[in-house]
Image (cartoon, rainbow, N blue to C red):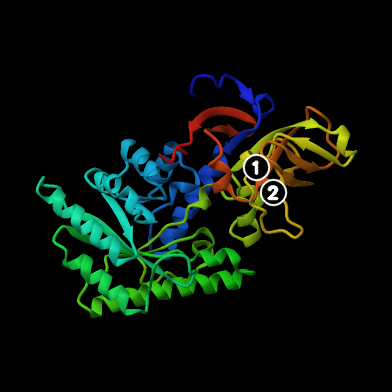
Amino acid sequence: MNAGCGKRTLHDLPTPALALDLDVLENNIGAMQRRAGALGVRLRPHVKSHKCVEVAKLQRARGAAGITVSTLAEARMFAEAGFDDILWAFPLNLSRLDEATGLSRRASFGIAVESRAAVAALESAAARMASAGTPPIRVWLEIDCGYGRTGLPGAGEELVQVAAHVAEAPNLALCGCFTHGGHAYQAGSAAAIRAVAEEERRAMVGAGERLRAAGIDPGALSVGSTPGVSHARTLAGIDEARPGNYALYDYTQVSLGSCEVRDCAVSVLSTVVSSAPLGKDRAVADCGALALSKDLGPDDPPHYGRIFASLEAGGLGEGKVVSVSQEHGQVTGAFSVGDKLRILPNHACLTVAHFDYFDVVRGAEVVDRWKIGRERG
């Protein structure tokens, strides 16, 4: 146990606090590793969801191969903790080119591109680095599988042209192609999520076939999202999957059928600070936007999080967080000043990004404190 935890329970924690249930976390990590094995793919978890070295170590110990990050700060933190085979799954930001190529000198670090401009910038940087004996920069192509956010169209000529540019550059190495079926989050049923997962799989398999036909080795073919991997019936032709939220889960994943409430490992602890102005069925607690984010979640009418029936979790009660400002959260229910609440967030990834550490619990007992690396510098 880290210093400062002592023998405490959830009832003793100052709030707002972020509780991480270790028993649930370990079960989630094991279950997704088995799921990946059943689908015949490697598991490269996206660590942006938890931003925590201790959680990533548990994932690696269960069989995860490599990690995915969203920021260079995450990449540095995990590289310094001894992780390698890191994919920065975000289009290369040319204002951070020197930082990105600097990381490529360290742990096996993959840089994502989806434009000719990004490849040209990397090629110039790699040429300068080659004189110092630096190995080729590892490049991954991002492909749009229908989400419409970023990525090269899988069926267009530009994919082959950009891939050829990478393959022909003497100081670049094409290590793989990846995509993200983020539109699975807008699917209205398990069948619709399966359809998105299959669309994602087919887009990547097709892109790989097109590159091979052009004489280019596409490297690893990578897909990923927690709902997609949870509902996919097959990942034939795919090498790896990159779900992230599965380690923690949240209310959105419950609504998508990716998990049950009992599988949600992270929750926000809050204390009621005011009740009189709002009447018997409303109160204010310290669970504002800087604890829960402003993600309204999947329900209609929308809310910012569901309140558990007790601090010991179990099932959800009727209470909800219905309004947030920066620090204040308005909650429904007959609560008194000083009452402690345990809240299931709509979006665990955004919630985690507001906290500096997890208070790790087994049952109601606080057993450790783990740092969250949320710096963006």
Q: Nearer the viewer, mark 1 or mark 2?
A: 1
In 3D space, how far apart are the residues under numbered discs 1 and 2 (Cα atoms)? 9 Å
| Residue 182 position within the rendered picture, expressed as x and y whole percent measured from the top left | 51, 64
| Residue 30 position within the rendered picture, expressed as x and y whole percent measured from the top left | 48, 49
Q: In the image shown, does 14 or 119 lie closer to the viewer? A: 119
* Up/down of 313 relative to 174, above or below: above
- Quadrant where the image shows the C terminus: top left
The structure residue drawn at horizontal position 69% and vertical position 48%, both measured from the top left corner, is 304
Q: Which residue is mark 2?
A: 304
Residue 334 left/right relative to 124: right
- In the picture, the disc for residue 262 is none
- Quarter of the view holding residue 258: bottom right
Q: Which residue is mark 1?
A: 289
For the question of whether residue 42 can be seen, the reply is yes
Q: Are marks 1 and 2 in contact (CB under 8 Å)?
A: yes
Mark 1 belongs to which amino acid? Ala
**Sequence order check, earlier mark of 1 and 2:** 1
Q: Crowding at label 2, few (<14), some or many (≥20) Cα neighbours within 10 Å? A: many
The structure residue drawn at horizontal position 19% and vertical position 67%, both measured from the top left corner, is 167
Q: Crowding at label 1, few (<14), some or many (≥20) Cα neighbours within 10 Å? A: some
The structure residue drawn at horizontal position 84% and vertical position 41%, both measured from the top left corner, is 282
Mark 2 belongs to which amino acid? Tyr
- Quarter of the view holding residue 106: top left
Label 2 secondary element: loop
* Up/down of 144 relative to 336, above or below: below
Residue 257 left/right relative to 41: right
Q: In the image shown, does 23 or 185 lie closer to the viewer? A: 185
* Up/down of 236 relative to 375, above or below: below
| Residue 5 position within the rendered picture, expressed as x and y whole percent measured from the top left | 55, 22
